Structures are given as structure tokens and as C-alpha cells.
Image (cartoon, helix red, strand yellow):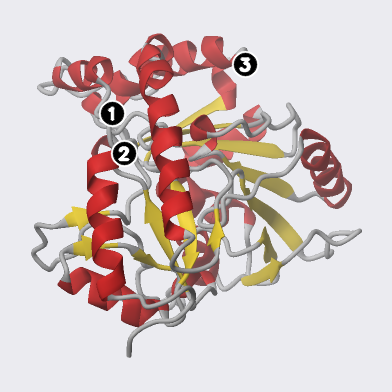
Amino acid sequence: MPELPPLIPRAPHGGPSSAAFTGLDFSVNANPYGPNPALLQAVRGADHAHYPDPSYSEVRGRLAAWHRVTPDQVALSVGASDLLHRLARAFLGPQDTLLSLYAPFGELARAAALGRAQVEVVPQWPERLPSTAALVYVGHPHNPTGRTLSASALHKLAEMCAATGALLIVDEAYAPFTLAPEPPRHAHVVRLLSPGKAHGLVGARPAYALAAPAVVARLDNLAPAWHLPAGTAALLAALPEAQDFLTHTLPQVARNAAALAASLAAFGTVEHHGTPYVLLHTGHAASVTAQLLSHGLRVRDCTSYGLPDYVRISTRTAADNAVLIEQLPHVLCTKGETHG
């Protein structure tokens, strides 16, 4: 029997767990004004009784026309996590390194570990990439810090990857919420898009990547037949014509997030860069997270990101945010100090 991949625990995420919860969840970075009615109608109206087209040609064609690329530059997926696992399987080997600016999304780090590759996290990009770097990852904006790169920095990084043969993964899960510049069109760039966050439809798990045809072919090669359910395929096909929802809701999300960040500053150092989530220094994040959970409030402990003193708090509606701010004094004392 060949050597099997190691058994590695699941990456921690925000959102529900197996334990019952009926409070307010501030741990998920999704548009609180969703779901987008047009996309929800597309999911409900899909043909769930028959197998979809195994090539998903219509979905690819619509997304390709929208992004001004060719259909063979579009890879489809149920959730960005699946694409990240396929990227790791296709391009990382035991002698390779995944290089990430700040902590990578947990699923990518886990995928690298399953392939016995190394993961190297850097606070800033080196002048030259290590020769072992096969995949380079940047969250744009990064989760949980919200930091972004400039267009020129992204182009420079793409050229650095081309010089060593690496692929640059630009994870744009939260780009619709911000003014983050669009990544360059480059043979060594993989744009990872998961529109469920901005459209309030994370449960449908829509995701796709834009990349060079050779990269897309390798990603498709690792996908099983009919890997996209009919509802998710219909959602992605309808996506280009369903952008009005973002025009109407994202400005309000931005206002709520900015107001939340301003209120949270009374309790600790805040980092916020226009994303729907805010990073708050609280001291011992695991303790604070547990205490808030006992008050019916779920936030994201950032220990798994290498930030054990921080929690990530995602905006909900203004009324929900007010409940959180009202309860925080029961858990947090003066700025930067915690009970217990």
C-alpha cells in the first residue's frame, strides 16, 4: 500500500459548530443584508432533477465574458477551499514551499501539510523568492488583518513568481467590500473569487478561479465529474447580472463596519481597512471568545492565524452591533485589559 497522507485536524473557521447556538454570530465575514434575492432565485430555479452539463460550458462562458477572458481560463468550484486543495495537489510537492504574506487561509495551509510541503509565513515580501517556493499566497484583502497590496506591488510579485516558476494565488474573497486594486492579468497569477461572502450566500458555496489555461486544465483534472451542484452552477451563471445588490448593500456594510471599529477602539487596539471585519486586540483571545460565547455572542479567535491576542469581529446590522458593544464591558475592562 502506498504511503497515505498524514491525518491532520480540520482548519478552524468562523461560523457554526456542532454545538447548538442561538445568539448573534459575529464570526462570519458575510454580507448581513443577504442573501441576494436574484441569486437565491437562480439557486431555487435550477434543474435539480438532472445531471448538469459536465463541462459547465454556459457557466464558464458567462463568467469569462464578464471578466473579459476565455472560458478555458475559468475553473469552477464548490467553495474556495476546494480550489485551494486542488492547487496544492497540482503544484506542491514534498520538496516545495507555500510562501504566504501573513498567515494563509487555514485550508491552504492544511492542504500544503497534507502534501507534506512546507509553509513559510513572512511579514513582508523578500527581494527574491526562495527557490523552493512553488505557490505564493496573498489575501487581497488579507483575512483577518484586512491589509491589501497596491497594484504595482501585485505586479512586481507576479514577475517575481514568473522568474522562479511559482504561481501567485490572489485570494479576493473580500475584495468586493473594499477598493482593493484588481490583480494583473498574468500567466503566473491565479485569481480566487468566492462571491458568496459579498452576496450573503455562503451556504451555496460559489467559487471560481481565473488563471492561465494550463493552470485551469490541471485544476479541472483534479475535480470529479459533476463537481458543481446545479444550484451553485446556476448562481454563478447569474452572477454577472446580479450586481445591483452589491451597489445597494455594500455601502451600508461599510458604514456599519466603520462605526463598529470606532466603538471597539474603546476596548483595545483596532485594525480595520474597510473590510466587513475588524481585528481587536483583547489579550487572551481564547478566553475572551469563550466569555463572549457565554453571553450569546460568537466572535473569531485569531489564535490559528498566529494572533493569540486578537479576535476578529465581523459587522452585522447596526442594531446587532449595538448589542455586542453593550455586552463587551461585561467581558473586557479598560482598553487592552481583560477579566480573568
* Mark 2: secondary structure: loop
Task: Determine which residue is flagged by label 2.
Answer: 205
- The percent position of residue 27, horizontal first and vertical second, equals 32, 56
Q: Residues within 10 Å of mark 2 (few under 14, many from 20)?
A: many
Nearer to me, 327 or 159 = 327
- Residue at position x 29%, y 49% in the image: 321
Rounded to the nearest angstrom, the CA distance separating label 3 from label 1 is 21 Å
Q: Is residue 183 visible?
A: yes
Please identify, in this view, whether the residue under mark 3 or under mark 2 is nearer the observer: 2
Q: Are marks 3 and 1 in contact (CB under 8 Å)?
A: no
Tell me if residue 7 can be seen.
no
Q: Earlier in the sequence, mark 1 or mark 2?
A: 2
The residue singled out by tag 1 in the image is 232
> Tag 1's secondary structure?
helix
Label 3 and label 2: CA atoms lie apart by 23 Å
The quarter of the picture where the C terminus appears is bottom left
Q: Which residue is mark 3?
A: 69
- First in sequence, mark 3 or 1: give its number: 3
Q: Position of residue 165 (x, y in %)?
A: 80, 49
Label 3–label 2 contact, CB within 8 A: no
